[in-house]
Image (tube, rainbow, N blue to C red):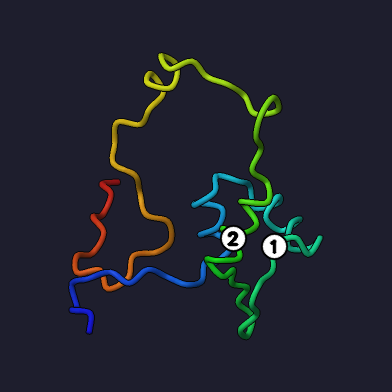
Amino acid sequence: MASRTETIAPITLSIADVVACTGLGRTKVYEAIRDRELPIVKIGKRSLVLDEDLRTWLRRHRVYGEAAPQRSKSESEASAPTDPPRRCGRPRNATEPAPLEAG
């Protein structure tokens, strides 16, 4: 059984979470849903995307070979993020409230 301090990986993502995780715009995500490329789950008024469906959709758009832009090793190292990767989605079981911005 998971303790209260552990986070639980979400199995569904809101459209806003999909946008945050992928870096795509809302319009592109809604186009994929409209074109039946990206399936959704409707619960009431909420539109949710299953994590596995998002990953499958992204894999289908993977590009190999000549079409993929190639970077030299020095370019890749220069653009490598220095901060640790962020989790997608909303935190689950957060123990601390978010800090307020001065304003």
| Residue 85 locus on image (x, y percent) | 34, 44
In the rendered image of this protein, does residue 10 appear above or below residue 103?
below
Residue lying at 71% horizontally and 58% vertically, measured from the top left: 30
Q: Classify mark 2: residues with Cα within 10 Å, few (<14), some (14-19) or many (20+).
A: some
Residue lying at 23% horizontally and 79% vertically, measured from the top left: 2
Assign a secondary structure to mark 2.
helix
User: Which comes before the other along the chain, label 1 or label 2?
Assistant: 1
In the rendered image of this protein, does residue 63 appear above or below residue 14?
above
Q: Are marks 1 and 2 in contact (CB under 8 Å)?
A: yes
Q: Nearer the viewer, residue 87 or 53?
A: 53
Assign a secondary structure to mark 1.
loop
| Residue 4 locus on image (x, y percent) | 19, 78
Tell me the quarter of the picture where residue 79 sits. Answer: top left
Residue lying at 49% horizontally and 52% vertically, measured from the top left: 21
Residue pointed to by mark 1: 38
Q: What's the amino acid at mark 2? A: Leu
In the visual, does 88 lie left or right of 85? right
In the visual, does 37 lie left or right of 86? right
In the visual, does 9 lie left or right of 102? right
Tell me the quarter of the image containing the N terminus: bottom left
Residue lying at 19% horizontally and 69% vertically, measured from the top left: 95
Q: What's the amino acid at mark 1? A: Leu
Tell me the quarter of the picture where residue 88 sits. Answer: bottom left
Q: Nearer the viewer, residue 18 or 77?
A: 77
The image's mark for residue 85 is none
Residue pointed to by mark 2: 54
